[in-house]
Amino acid sequence: MSSEGAVLKGREAEVVAGVHQQLFVGGKWRDAEGQKTFSVEDPSTGETIAEVADASVADGKAALDAAVAAQADWAKTPPRDRGEILRKAFELITERADDLALLMTLEMGKPISESKAEIAYGAEFFRWFSEEAVRIDGRYAVAPNGATRLLTLKQPVGPCLMITPWNFPLAMGTRKIGPAIAAGCTMVVKPASLTPLTMLALADVLVEAGLPEGVLNVVTTTSTGEVMEPLIRDPRLRKLTFTGSTGVGRRLIEQSAEGILRVSMELGGNAPFLVFEDADLDRAVDGAMLAKMRNIGEACTAANRFLVHESVADEFSRRLAERMGAMTVGRGSEDGVQVGPLVEKKARDKVTELVADAVGSGAEVLTGGEVPDGPGWFYPPTVLAGVSLDAQVFREEIFGPVAPVFTFSTDEEALRMANDTEYGLVAYAFTESLERAVRVYEGLETGMVGINQGVVSNPAAPFGGVKASGFGREGGAEGIDEYLEVKYVGLAL
Ligand code: NAP
Protein backbone atom coordinates (compact mmCIF):
# COMPACT_ATOMS: atom_id res chain seq x y z
CA MET A 1 0.00 0.00 0.00
CA SER A 2 1.27 3.46 -0.62
CA SER A 3 1.09 6.76 1.13
CA GLU A 4 -2.09 8.47 2.11
CA GLY A 5 -2.68 12.07 1.09
CA ALA A 6 -1.58 14.35 3.90
CA VAL A 7 -4.61 16.54 3.26
CA LEU A 8 -7.05 13.88 4.43
CA LYS A 9 -7.85 13.13 8.05
CA GLY A 10 -9.55 10.42 10.11
CA ARG A 11 -11.67 7.86 8.27
CA GLU A 12 -11.08 9.61 4.92
CA ALA A 13 -7.31 9.12 5.27
CA GLU A 14 -7.79 5.52 6.42
CA VAL A 15 -9.96 4.43 3.49
CA VAL A 16 -7.56 5.92 0.95
CA ALA A 17 -4.54 4.39 2.70
CA GLY A 18 -6.33 1.03 2.73
CA VAL A 19 -6.30 0.79 -1.08
CA HIS A 20 -3.39 -0.75 -3.01
CA GLN A 21 -2.19 2.04 -5.27
CA GLN A 22 -0.21 -0.19 -7.60
CA LEU A 23 -0.87 -2.21 -10.72
CA PHE A 24 -2.57 -5.57 -10.27
CA VAL A 25 -1.01 -8.05 -12.69
CA GLY A 26 -1.12 -11.85 -12.60
CA GLY A 27 -2.47 -11.83 -9.03
CA LYS A 28 0.33 -9.59 -7.68
CA TRP A 29 0.41 -5.94 -6.72
CA ARG A 30 3.43 -4.24 -8.29
CA ASP A 31 4.83 -0.83 -9.13
CA ALA A 32 4.80 0.59 -12.62
CA GLU A 33 8.00 0.42 -14.66
CA GLY A 34 10.39 3.06 -13.33
CA GLN A 35 8.16 3.50 -10.22
CA LYS A 36 6.18 6.14 -12.10
CA THR A 37 3.03 7.44 -10.41
CA PHE A 38 0.32 10.02 -11.01
CA SER A 39 -1.83 12.05 -8.63
CA VAL A 40 -5.49 11.55 -7.83
CA GLU A 41 -7.30 14.70 -6.73
CA ASP A 42 -10.32 15.46 -4.58
CA PRO A 43 -12.51 17.57 -6.90
CA SER A 44 -14.04 19.41 -3.94
CA THR A 45 -10.65 20.89 -2.98
CA GLY A 46 -8.36 20.28 -5.96
CA GLU A 47 -5.87 18.68 -3.55
CA THR A 48 -3.95 15.45 -4.16
CA ILE A 49 -5.27 12.52 -2.12
CA ALA A 50 -3.24 9.64 -3.58
CA GLU A 51 -0.39 8.70 -5.90
CA VAL A 52 -1.20 5.76 -8.14
CA ALA A 53 1.07 3.63 -10.36
CA ASP A 54 1.35 5.05 -13.89
CA ALA A 55 1.72 2.08 -16.23
CA SER A 56 4.03 1.98 -19.26
CA VAL A 57 3.48 0.15 -22.53
CA ALA A 58 5.46 -2.81 -21.12
CA ASP A 59 3.26 -2.87 -17.99
CA GLY A 60 0.16 -2.96 -20.18
CA LYS A 61 1.59 -5.84 -22.16
CA ALA A 62 2.44 -7.73 -18.96
CA ALA A 63 -1.19 -7.43 -17.90
CA LEU A 64 -2.39 -8.89 -21.20
CA ASP A 65 0.23 -11.68 -20.93
CA ALA A 66 -1.24 -12.58 -17.52
CA ALA A 67 -4.81 -12.56 -18.85
CA VAL A 68 -3.83 -14.75 -21.82
CA ALA A 69 -1.97 -17.20 -19.55
CA ALA A 70 -4.99 -17.61 -17.27
CA GLN A 71 -7.63 -17.96 -20.01
CA ALA A 72 -7.62 -21.73 -20.68
CA ASP A 73 -7.92 -22.82 -17.03
CA TRP A 74 -10.47 -20.15 -16.27
CA ALA A 75 -12.69 -21.22 -19.16
CA LYS A 76 -12.65 -24.76 -17.71
CA THR A 77 -13.61 -23.63 -14.19
CA PRO A 78 -17.14 -24.86 -13.46
CA PRO A 79 -19.83 -22.21 -13.97
CA ARG A 80 -21.07 -22.73 -10.41
CA ASP A 81 -17.60 -21.87 -9.05
CA ARG A 82 -17.40 -18.75 -11.19
CA GLY A 83 -20.87 -17.75 -10.01
CA GLU A 84 -19.96 -18.32 -6.35
CA ILE A 85 -16.98 -15.95 -6.66
CA LEU A 86 -19.30 -13.24 -7.96
CA ARG A 87 -21.82 -13.93 -5.23
CA LYS A 88 -19.12 -13.67 -2.55
CA ALA A 89 -17.83 -10.44 -4.10
CA PHE A 90 -21.39 -9.05 -4.07
CA GLU A 91 -21.58 -9.81 -0.35
CA LEU A 92 -18.19 -8.25 0.40
CA ILE A 93 -19.04 -5.06 -1.50
CA THR A 94 -22.34 -4.83 0.37
CA GLU A 95 -20.58 -5.30 3.73
CA ARG A 96 -18.04 -2.61 2.86
CA ALA A 97 -20.50 -0.21 1.24
CA ASP A 98 -19.78 2.66 3.65
CA ASP A 99 -16.01 2.65 3.08
CA LEU A 100 -16.30 2.11 -0.65
CA ALA A 101 -18.81 4.97 -0.88
CA LEU A 102 -16.48 7.30 1.01
CA LEU A 103 -13.58 6.33 -1.25
CA MET A 104 -15.68 6.98 -4.35
CA THR A 105 -16.85 10.35 -3.06
CA LEU A 106 -13.29 11.42 -2.30
CA GLU A 107 -12.01 10.73 -5.81
CA MET A 108 -15.13 11.57 -7.83
CA GLY A 109 -16.91 14.23 -5.78
CA LYS A 110 -20.51 13.03 -5.66
CA PRO A 111 -22.42 13.06 -2.35
CA ILE A 112 -22.12 9.97 -0.14
CA SER A 113 -25.80 9.15 -0.73
CA GLU A 114 -25.12 9.00 -4.49
CA SER A 115 -22.00 6.89 -3.97
CA LYS A 116 -23.96 4.47 -1.78
CA ALA A 117 -26.61 4.21 -4.48
CA GLU A 118 -23.88 3.40 -7.02
CA ILE A 119 -22.32 0.79 -4.72
CA ALA A 120 -25.70 -0.95 -4.40
CA TYR A 121 -26.32 -0.72 -8.16
CA GLY A 122 -22.78 -1.81 -9.06
CA ALA A 123 -22.79 -4.77 -6.64
CA GLU A 124 -26.11 -5.92 -8.06
CA PHE A 125 -24.40 -6.72 -11.39
CA PHE A 126 -22.29 -9.29 -9.55
CA ARG A 127 -25.37 -10.86 -7.95
CA TRP A 128 -27.21 -10.86 -11.28
CA PHE A 129 -24.33 -12.45 -13.21
CA SER A 130 -23.60 -14.94 -10.41
CA GLU A 131 -27.06 -16.25 -11.30
CA GLU A 132 -26.50 -16.07 -15.07
CA ALA A 133 -23.20 -18.04 -14.91
CA VAL A 134 -25.13 -21.31 -14.50
CA ARG A 135 -27.65 -20.56 -17.25
CA ILE A 136 -25.34 -20.54 -20.27
CA ASP A 137 -27.11 -22.89 -22.60
CA GLY A 138 -27.29 -24.06 -26.23
CA ARG A 139 -29.78 -25.52 -28.68
CA TYR A 140 -30.48 -28.82 -30.34
CA ALA A 141 -32.42 -29.10 -33.58
CA VAL A 142 -33.17 -31.56 -36.34
CA ALA A 143 -32.07 -30.19 -39.73
CA PRO A 144 -35.03 -29.54 -42.07
CA ASN A 145 -34.03 -32.48 -44.30
CA GLY A 146 -33.78 -34.74 -41.26
CA ALA A 147 -30.28 -35.92 -42.17
CA THR A 148 -28.22 -34.11 -39.55
CA ARG A 149 -28.54 -32.72 -36.08
CA LEU A 150 -27.75 -29.06 -35.39
CA LEU A 151 -26.13 -28.29 -32.05
CA THR A 152 -25.16 -24.86 -30.73
CA LEU A 153 -23.01 -24.22 -27.73
CA LYS A 154 -21.61 -21.07 -26.15
CA GLN A 155 -17.98 -20.63 -25.22
CA PRO A 156 -16.10 -17.73 -23.61
CA VAL A 157 -14.83 -15.13 -26.09
CA GLY A 158 -11.38 -15.08 -24.46
CA PRO A 159 -9.21 -12.30 -23.00
CA CYS A 160 -11.02 -8.94 -22.86
CA LEU A 161 -9.89 -5.33 -22.50
CA MET A 162 -12.25 -3.10 -20.48
CA ILE A 163 -11.91 0.66 -20.50
CA THR A 164 -14.16 2.53 -18.07
CA PRO A 165 -15.04 6.19 -17.36
CA TRP A 166 -14.85 8.24 -14.15
CA ASN A 167 -18.54 9.03 -13.65
CA PHE A 168 -19.55 5.64 -12.16
CA PRO A 169 -16.17 4.30 -10.99
CA LEU A 170 -17.61 1.02 -9.67
CA ALA A 171 -20.73 0.23 -11.70
CA MET A 172 -19.15 0.80 -15.12
CA GLY A 173 -16.61 -1.84 -14.08
CA THR A 174 -18.92 -4.40 -12.47
CA ARG A 175 -21.27 -4.50 -15.43
CA LYS A 176 -18.35 -5.61 -17.61
CA ILE A 177 -16.39 -7.67 -15.06
CA GLY A 178 -19.52 -9.51 -13.82
CA PRO A 179 -20.54 -11.04 -17.17
CA ALA A 180 -16.91 -11.70 -18.16
CA ILE A 181 -16.33 -13.72 -14.97
CA ALA A 182 -19.66 -15.51 -15.41
CA ALA A 183 -18.84 -16.38 -19.04
CA GLY A 184 -15.28 -17.58 -18.28
CA CYS A 185 -13.28 -14.72 -19.82
CA THR A 186 -10.10 -13.21 -18.39
CA MET A 187 -9.56 -9.46 -18.53
CA VAL A 188 -7.41 -6.36 -18.34
CA VAL A 189 -9.28 -3.40 -16.83
CA LYS A 190 -8.22 0.21 -17.38
CA PRO A 191 -10.15 2.58 -15.10
CA ALA A 192 -10.31 6.33 -15.78
CA SER A 193 -7.23 8.12 -14.48
CA LEU A 194 -9.39 10.64 -12.59
CA THR A 195 -10.92 7.85 -10.44
CA PRO A 196 -8.70 4.74 -10.26
CA LEU A 197 -9.04 4.06 -6.51
CA THR A 198 -12.50 2.44 -6.53
CA MET A 199 -11.40 -0.08 -9.20
CA LEU A 200 -8.25 -0.91 -7.22
CA ALA A 201 -10.41 -1.51 -4.14
CA LEU A 202 -12.68 -3.74 -6.25
CA ALA A 203 -9.70 -5.85 -7.32
CA ASP A 204 -8.99 -6.52 -3.64
CA VAL A 205 -12.59 -7.59 -3.11
CA LEU A 206 -12.39 -10.05 -6.02
CA VAL A 207 -9.13 -11.53 -4.71
CA GLU A 208 -10.76 -12.06 -1.33
CA ALA A 209 -13.77 -13.63 -3.06
CA GLY A 210 -11.41 -16.24 -4.55
CA LEU A 211 -10.78 -15.05 -8.11
CA PRO A 212 -7.75 -16.97 -9.43
CA GLU A 213 -4.53 -15.19 -10.42
CA GLY A 214 -4.49 -13.56 -13.82
CA VAL A 215 -8.25 -13.59 -14.40
CA LEU A 216 -8.51 -9.88 -13.55
CA ASN A 217 -5.64 -7.46 -14.15
CA VAL A 218 -5.87 -3.73 -13.44
CA VAL A 219 -3.73 -1.19 -15.24
CA THR A 220 -3.82 2.49 -14.23
CA THR A 221 -2.08 4.92 -16.54
CA THR A 222 -2.00 8.47 -17.83
CA SER A 223 -0.28 7.40 -21.08
CA THR A 224 -3.69 6.04 -21.97
CA GLY A 225 -3.71 5.91 -25.77
CA GLU A 226 -0.08 4.79 -25.92
CA VAL A 227 -0.63 1.90 -23.48
CA MET A 228 -4.04 0.80 -24.78
CA GLU A 229 -3.41 0.80 -28.54
CA PRO A 230 -0.85 -2.06 -28.61
CA LEU A 231 -3.25 -4.17 -26.53
CA ILE A 232 -6.14 -3.45 -28.90
CA ARG A 233 -3.91 -4.40 -31.85
CA ASP A 234 -2.58 -7.55 -30.12
CA PRO A 235 -4.03 -10.65 -31.85
CA ARG A 236 -4.31 -12.44 -28.51
CA LEU A 237 -6.98 -9.98 -27.34
CA ARG A 238 -10.48 -11.18 -28.29
CA LYS A 239 -12.75 -8.40 -27.11
CA LEU A 240 -12.76 -4.70 -26.34
CA THR A 241 -15.51 -3.22 -24.21
CA PHE A 242 -15.51 0.52 -23.73
CA THR A 243 -17.65 3.01 -21.84
CA GLY A 244 -16.84 6.64 -22.44
CA SER A 245 -17.17 9.46 -24.92
CA THR A 246 -18.22 8.97 -28.52
CA GLY A 247 -15.03 10.63 -29.78
CA VAL A 248 -12.71 8.17 -28.04
CA GLY A 249 -15.07 5.30 -28.92
CA ARG A 250 -14.77 6.11 -32.64
CA ARG A 251 -10.97 6.00 -32.40
CA LEU A 252 -11.04 2.65 -30.59
CA ILE A 253 -13.39 1.12 -33.18
CA GLU A 254 -10.87 2.11 -35.86
CA GLN A 255 -8.02 0.52 -33.90
CA SER A 256 -10.01 -2.66 -33.34
CA ALA A 257 -10.76 -3.06 -37.07
CA GLU A 258 -7.25 -4.38 -37.69
CA GLY A 259 -7.73 -7.49 -35.57
CA ILE A 260 -11.48 -7.79 -36.39
CA LEU A 261 -11.92 -7.53 -32.64
CA ARG A 262 -15.32 -8.04 -31.04
CA VAL A 263 -16.33 -4.65 -29.68
CA SER A 264 -19.01 -3.24 -27.34
CA MET A 265 -19.39 0.51 -27.08
CA GLU A 266 -21.35 2.39 -24.42
CA LEU A 267 -20.93 5.99 -25.53
CA GLY A 268 -22.36 9.45 -25.00
CA GLY A 269 -25.99 10.50 -24.73
CA ASN A 270 -28.27 13.48 -25.29
CA ALA A 271 -31.41 12.26 -23.56
CA PRO A 272 -34.70 14.00 -24.29
CA PHE A 273 -37.17 14.27 -21.39
CA LEU A 274 -40.67 14.70 -22.83
CA VAL A 275 -43.51 16.14 -20.79
CA PHE A 276 -46.88 16.00 -22.59
CA GLU A 277 -49.86 18.18 -21.75
CA ASP A 278 -51.65 15.29 -20.00
CA ALA A 279 -48.66 14.41 -17.77
CA ASP A 280 -49.02 14.22 -14.00
CA LEU A 281 -46.76 17.18 -13.23
CA ASP A 282 -45.88 16.01 -9.71
CA ARG A 283 -44.61 12.78 -11.18
CA ALA A 284 -42.87 14.59 -14.03
CA VAL A 285 -41.00 16.93 -11.69
CA ASP A 286 -39.98 14.02 -9.42
CA GLY A 287 -38.78 12.15 -12.51
CA ALA A 288 -36.93 15.22 -13.76
CA MET A 289 -35.08 15.57 -10.45
CA LEU A 290 -33.81 12.01 -10.79
CA ALA A 291 -33.10 12.14 -14.51
CA LYS A 292 -31.22 15.42 -14.15
CA MET A 293 -29.66 15.41 -10.71
CA ARG A 294 -28.65 11.75 -10.26
CA ASN A 295 -24.85 11.79 -10.20
CA ILE A 296 -24.87 15.66 -10.39
CA GLY A 297 -25.97 15.34 -14.01
CA GLU A 298 -22.69 13.57 -14.84
CA ALA A 299 -24.38 10.54 -16.41
CA CYS A 300 -24.74 9.38 -20.00
CA THR A 301 -28.40 8.81 -19.10
CA ALA A 302 -28.90 12.32 -17.67
CA ALA A 303 -31.83 14.25 -19.13
CA ASN A 304 -30.08 16.71 -21.44
CA ARG A 305 -33.07 18.38 -23.11
CA PHE A 306 -36.41 18.97 -21.38
CA LEU A 307 -39.02 19.05 -24.15
CA VAL A 308 -42.24 20.30 -22.56
CA HIS A 309 -45.67 20.98 -24.08
CA GLU A 310 -46.19 24.75 -24.32
CA SER A 311 -49.33 24.61 -22.14
CA VAL A 312 -47.44 23.21 -19.10
CA ALA A 313 -43.90 24.51 -19.71
CA ASP A 314 -44.09 27.53 -17.36
CA GLU A 315 -45.53 25.50 -14.49
CA PHE A 316 -43.08 22.62 -15.00
CA SER A 317 -40.04 24.95 -15.23
CA ARG A 318 -41.08 26.93 -12.15
CA ARG A 319 -41.53 23.79 -10.05
CA LEU A 320 -38.29 22.26 -11.28
CA ALA A 321 -36.41 25.50 -10.53
CA GLU A 322 -37.86 25.57 -7.01
CA ARG A 323 -36.71 22.01 -6.32
CA MET A 324 -33.29 22.34 -7.93
CA GLY A 325 -32.65 25.77 -6.41
CA ALA A 326 -33.30 24.34 -2.91
CA MET A 327 -30.60 21.66 -3.14
CA THR A 328 -27.57 21.81 -0.82
CA VAL A 329 -24.27 22.11 -2.67
CA GLY A 330 -21.01 21.15 -0.92
CA ARG A 331 -18.25 18.63 -0.35
CA GLY A 332 -19.72 15.19 -1.00
CA SER A 333 -18.60 13.68 2.31
CA GLU A 334 -20.36 16.35 4.42
CA ASP A 335 -23.75 15.63 5.98
CA GLY A 336 -26.79 16.84 4.10
CA VAL A 337 -24.96 17.64 0.86
CA GLN A 338 -27.03 16.77 -2.23
CA VAL A 339 -24.83 18.22 -4.98
CA GLY A 340 -21.05 17.75 -5.03
CA PRO A 341 -18.48 19.38 -7.30
CA LEU A 342 -18.01 18.48 -10.95
CA VAL A 343 -15.10 16.15 -11.56
CA GLU A 344 -12.52 18.64 -12.83
CA LYS A 345 -12.01 22.22 -14.01
CA LYS A 346 -12.42 21.28 -17.68
CA ALA A 347 -15.87 19.84 -16.93
CA ARG A 348 -16.99 22.99 -15.10
CA ASP A 349 -15.63 25.25 -17.85
CA LYS A 350 -17.65 23.29 -20.41
CA VAL A 351 -20.88 23.66 -18.37
CA THR A 352 -20.21 27.39 -17.87
CA GLU A 353 -19.68 27.81 -21.60
CA LEU A 354 -22.89 25.94 -22.50
CA VAL A 355 -24.96 28.06 -20.10
CA ALA A 356 -23.42 31.30 -21.44
CA ASP A 357 -24.19 30.19 -24.98
CA ALA A 358 -27.84 29.38 -24.13
CA VAL A 359 -28.30 32.71 -22.34
CA GLY A 360 -26.65 34.48 -25.29
CA SER A 361 -29.28 32.98 -27.57
CA GLY A 362 -32.19 34.15 -25.41
CA ALA A 363 -32.62 31.67 -22.51
CA GLU A 364 -33.80 32.91 -19.11
CA VAL A 365 -31.99 31.65 -15.97
CA LEU A 366 -34.66 30.57 -13.44
CA THR A 367 -32.14 29.39 -10.84
CA GLY A 368 -28.35 28.95 -10.60
CA GLY A 369 -26.09 29.90 -13.48
CA GLU A 370 -23.25 31.48 -11.45
CA VAL A 371 -19.93 29.78 -10.64
CA PRO A 372 -19.35 30.14 -6.86
CA ASP A 373 -16.11 31.51 -5.41
CA GLY A 374 -13.71 29.25 -3.54
CA PRO A 375 -11.88 25.97 -4.13
CA GLY A 376 -13.36 22.92 -5.88
CA TRP A 377 -15.19 22.57 -9.17
CA PHE A 378 -18.69 23.42 -7.95
CA TYR A 379 -21.53 24.48 -10.22
CA PRO A 380 -25.03 25.21 -8.87
CA PRO A 381 -28.19 23.42 -10.04
CA THR A 382 -29.43 25.56 -12.92
CA VAL A 383 -32.71 25.75 -14.83
CA LEU A 384 -32.92 27.58 -18.15
CA ALA A 385 -36.31 28.46 -19.67
CA GLY A 386 -37.19 29.45 -23.22
CA VAL A 387 -34.05 27.89 -24.69
CA SER A 388 -33.53 28.27 -28.44
CA LEU A 389 -33.10 25.17 -30.61
CA ASP A 390 -29.92 26.80 -31.91
CA ALA A 391 -28.29 26.70 -28.46
CA GLN A 392 -25.38 24.24 -28.10
CA VAL A 393 -27.17 22.48 -25.21
CA PHE A 394 -29.62 21.08 -27.76
CA ARG A 395 -26.80 19.11 -29.43
CA GLU A 396 -24.09 18.62 -26.79
CA GLU A 397 -23.90 16.49 -23.70
CA ILE A 398 -23.98 18.88 -20.69
CA PHE A 399 -22.64 16.48 -18.04
CA GLY A 400 -23.59 18.82 -15.22
CA PRO A 401 -26.57 20.04 -13.15
CA VAL A 402 -28.15 22.19 -15.86
CA ALA A 403 -31.73 21.68 -17.09
CA PRO A 404 -32.60 23.52 -20.33
CA VAL A 405 -36.33 23.65 -21.12
CA PHE A 406 -37.55 23.75 -24.74
CA THR A 407 -41.21 23.79 -25.77
CA PHE A 408 -43.29 21.94 -28.37
CA SER A 409 -46.92 22.15 -29.52
CA THR A 410 -47.72 18.74 -31.10
CA ASP A 411 -46.71 15.12 -30.48
CA GLU A 412 -45.13 14.96 -33.95
CA GLU A 413 -42.99 17.99 -33.19
CA ALA A 414 -41.99 16.50 -29.82
CA LEU A 415 -40.81 13.25 -31.43
CA ARG A 416 -39.01 15.10 -34.20
CA MET A 417 -37.14 17.22 -31.65
CA ALA A 418 -36.37 14.19 -29.47
CA ASN A 419 -34.83 12.30 -32.40
CA ASP A 420 -33.00 15.31 -33.82
CA THR A 421 -29.61 14.26 -32.43
CA GLU A 422 -26.78 11.95 -33.42
CA TYR A 423 -27.16 10.17 -30.05
CA GLY A 424 -29.67 7.47 -29.12
CA LEU A 425 -29.05 6.15 -25.62
CA VAL A 426 -32.17 6.84 -23.57
CA ALA A 427 -35.32 8.99 -23.56
CA TYR A 428 -37.94 9.72 -20.91
CA ALA A 429 -41.60 10.49 -21.53
CA PHE A 430 -44.34 11.55 -19.14
CA THR A 431 -47.97 11.10 -20.15
CA GLU A 432 -51.12 9.61 -18.60
CA SER A 433 -52.26 8.21 -21.96
CA LEU A 434 -51.36 4.61 -22.74
CA GLU A 435 -51.87 5.10 -26.48
CA ARG A 436 -49.58 8.12 -26.52
CA ALA A 437 -46.97 6.27 -24.46
CA VAL A 438 -46.91 3.40 -26.96
CA ARG A 439 -46.69 5.74 -29.99
CA VAL A 440 -43.89 7.65 -28.31
CA TYR A 441 -41.75 4.72 -27.16
CA GLU A 442 -42.11 3.07 -30.55
CA GLY A 443 -41.11 6.31 -32.30
CA LEU A 444 -38.09 7.20 -30.19
CA GLU A 445 -34.70 6.36 -31.75
CA THR A 446 -33.02 5.23 -28.52
CA GLY A 447 -31.87 1.97 -26.96
CA MET A 448 -33.88 2.64 -23.77
CA VAL A 449 -37.03 4.53 -22.78
CA GLY A 450 -38.38 5.45 -19.35
CA ILE A 451 -42.16 5.97 -19.28
CA ASN A 452 -43.24 8.04 -16.27
CA GLN A 453 -39.90 7.29 -14.60
CA GLY A 454 -36.63 9.22 -14.47
CA VAL A 455 -34.18 6.29 -14.11
CA VAL A 456 -33.94 3.23 -16.34
CA SER A 457 -30.67 1.65 -15.17
CA ASN A 458 -31.29 -1.82 -13.77
CA PRO A 459 -28.88 -4.79 -13.72
CA ALA A 460 -31.70 -7.08 -14.86
CA ALA A 461 -32.33 -5.00 -18.02
CA PRO A 462 -30.26 -4.60 -21.21
CA PHE A 463 -28.52 -1.21 -21.03
CA GLY A 464 -27.22 0.32 -24.25
CA GLY A 465 -27.75 2.69 -27.11
CA VAL A 466 -28.22 3.08 -30.85
CA LYS A 467 -26.77 5.61 -33.34
CA ALA A 468 -23.69 7.42 -31.95
CA SER A 469 -24.47 6.14 -28.43
CA GLY A 470 -22.90 2.82 -29.41
CA PHE A 471 -23.76 -0.85 -29.67
CA GLY A 472 -23.83 -3.87 -27.42
CA ARG A 473 -25.86 -4.34 -24.23
CA GLU A 474 -24.82 -4.57 -20.58
CA GLY A 475 -26.97 -6.26 -17.95
CA GLY A 476 -30.07 -8.38 -18.37
CA ALA A 477 -30.06 -11.76 -20.06
CA GLU A 478 -28.34 -10.07 -23.04
CA GLY A 479 -25.32 -8.88 -21.03
CA ILE A 480 -23.54 -12.23 -20.84
CA ASP A 481 -23.88 -12.88 -24.59
CA GLU A 482 -21.36 -10.08 -25.20
CA TYR A 483 -18.74 -12.38 -23.64
CA LEU A 484 -19.76 -15.63 -25.36
CA GLU A 485 -19.19 -17.00 -28.85
CA VAL A 486 -21.80 -19.25 -30.41
CA LYS A 487 -20.40 -22.43 -31.92
CA TYR A 488 -22.53 -24.57 -34.21
CA VAL A 489 -21.84 -28.27 -34.65
CA GLY A 490 -23.38 -30.22 -37.52
CA LEU A 491 -23.73 -33.86 -36.57
CA ALA A 492 -24.25 -36.35 -39.40
CA LEU A 493 -26.25 -39.46 -38.69
P1 NAP B 1 -13.50 9.44 -22.07
O1 NAP B 1 -12.65 10.65 -22.05
O2 NAP B 1 -13.91 8.88 -23.37
O3 NAP B 1 -12.73 8.36 -21.20
C1 NAP B 1 -13.27 7.09 -20.94
C2 NAP B 1 -12.14 6.11 -20.74
O4 NAP B 1 -11.41 6.03 -21.95
C3 NAP B 1 -11.15 6.52 -19.67
O5 NAP B 1 -10.68 5.37 -19.00
C4 NAP B 1 -10.04 7.14 -20.49
O6 NAP B 1 -8.78 7.09 -19.87
C5 NAP B 1 -10.04 6.24 -21.70
N1 NAP B 1 -9.39 6.84 -22.87
C6 NAP B 1 -9.25 8.14 -23.19
N2 NAP B 1 -8.56 8.27 -24.34
C7 NAP B 1 -8.24 7.01 -24.75
C8 NAP B 1 -7.52 6.48 -25.86
N3 NAP B 1 -7.00 7.25 -26.79
N4 NAP B 1 -7.37 5.13 -25.95
C9 NAP B 1 -7.91 4.33 -25.02
N5 NAP B 1 -8.60 4.78 -23.94
C10 NAP B 1 -8.78 6.10 -23.81
O7 NAP B 1 -14.87 9.68 -21.30
P2 NAP B 1 -15.07 10.23 -19.83
O8 NAP B 1 -14.97 11.70 -19.89
O9 NAP B 1 -14.24 9.48 -18.85
O10 NAP B 1 -16.55 9.75 -19.56
C11 NAP B 1 -17.64 10.49 -19.90
C12 NAP B 1 -18.27 9.94 -21.19
O11 NAP B 1 -18.66 8.58 -20.98
C13 NAP B 1 -19.54 10.67 -21.53
O12 NAP B 1 -19.61 10.92 -22.91
C14 NAP B 1 -20.63 9.69 -21.11
O13 NAP B 1 -21.84 9.87 -21.79
C15 NAP B 1 -19.99 8.39 -21.41
N6 NAP B 1 -20.62 7.32 -20.64
C16 NAP B 1 -21.39 6.42 -21.31
C17 NAP B 1 -22.05 5.42 -20.61
C18 NAP B 1 -22.90 4.43 -21.34
O14 NAP B 1 -23.15 3.37 -20.78
N7 NAP B 1 -23.36 4.70 -22.55
C19 NAP B 1 -21.90 5.32 -19.23
C20 NAP B 1 -21.11 6.25 -18.58
C21 NAP B 1 -20.47 7.24 -19.30
P3 NAP B 1 -8.18 8.37 -19.09
O15 NAP B 1 -9.08 8.58 -17.96
O16 NAP B 1 -6.83 7.93 -18.70
O17 NAP B 1 -8.21 9.51 -20.08
Image (cartoon, rainbow, N blue to C red):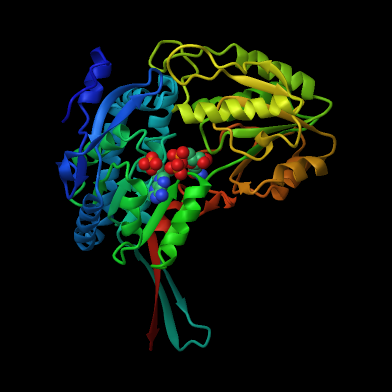
Task: Say whether residue 437 is visible.
Answer: yes
Question: Foreground: 70 or 247?
Answer: 247
Residue 368: image x %, image y %? Answer: 62, 16
Residue 236: image x %, image y %? Answer: 29, 65
Image quarter for ligand 1 equals top left
Query: Is 416 on the left-hand or right-hand side of 194?
Result: right
Please name the residue shown 28% across and 17% down the image: 12
Please name the residue shown 35% across and 59% down the image: 232
- Label tally: 0
Image-quadrant location for residue 455: top right
Query: Is 31 on the left-hand or right-hand side of 138?
Result: left
Please name the residue shown 38% across and 61% down the image: 484
- Asked if 92 appears above or below 327 in the picture, the reply is below
> Which quadrant of the figure contains the C terminus?
bottom left
Question: Foreground: 126 or 223?
Answer: 223
> Which quadrant of the figure contains the N terminus?
top left
Task: Say whether residue 210 is visible.
Answer: no
Image-quadrant location for residue 314: top right
Question: Foreground: 379 or 17?
Answer: 379
